[in-house]
């Protein structure tokens, strides 16, 4: 019987696909290290899936940038920033 080898999925230019990046970020936020990130794949898929529908602040930001000369990557980062700026009532401000 042959050995099972897990191949790391890579996107263009050899960069890890988004799901791996998210899994690594979840693992590091939870345990302080990326070691064992493979165990966070389910959560990573769920986190990416949750972003399928943009929030109102993301849509508003997109509309405000329509006439800008920014590249897609820059606009995308601004949309994610808009989503992250939304306060969540369960998060307590440490200040």
Image (cartoon, helix red, strand yellow):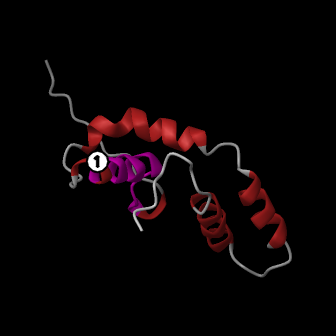
Residue 43 x %, y %: 41, 36
Near mark 1 (Cα within 10 A), the count class, few <14, some 14-19 or many ≥20, is few
Residue located 64% across and 69% down the image: 78
Is 19 rendered above or below residue 15? above
Vertical relation: 61 (above or below) 69: above
Q: Residue at x 39, y 55 (%)?
A: 16
**Callout 1 secondary element:** helix
Q: Position of residue 29 (x, y in %)?
A: 31, 53
3 left or right of 48 in image? left
Residue located at (59% from left, 56% from top): 87
Q: Is residue 45 left or right of residue 55?
A: left
Tell me where residue 74 sits by quadrant.
bottom right
**94 is higher (above) or lower (below) than 10:** below
* On-image quarter of the C terminus: bottom left
Residue at the extreme front: 95
Q: Is residue 6 left or right of residue 75?
A: left
Mark 1 = which residue? 30
Q: Is residue 51 magenta?
A: no
Instruction: Report the magenta stretch's main SS.
Output: helix
Residue at x 15%, y 28% (from the top left corner): 3
Q: Which residues are magenta?
A: 14-28
Q: Position of residue 94 (x, y in %)?
A: 40, 63
């Amino acid at each position: 019987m042959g050995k099972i080898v897990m191949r790391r999925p890579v996107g263009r230019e050899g960069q890890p696909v988004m799901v791996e990046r998210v899994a690594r970020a979840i693992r590091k936020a939870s345990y302080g290290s990326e070691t064992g990130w493979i165990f966070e794949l389910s959560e990573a898929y769920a986190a990416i899936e949750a972003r399928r529908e943009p929030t109102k602040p993301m849509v508003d930001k997109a509309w405000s940038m329509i006439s800008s000369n920014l590249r897609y990557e820059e606009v995308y980062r601004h949309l994610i920033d808009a989503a992250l700026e939304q306060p969540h009532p369960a998060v307590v401000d440490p200040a």
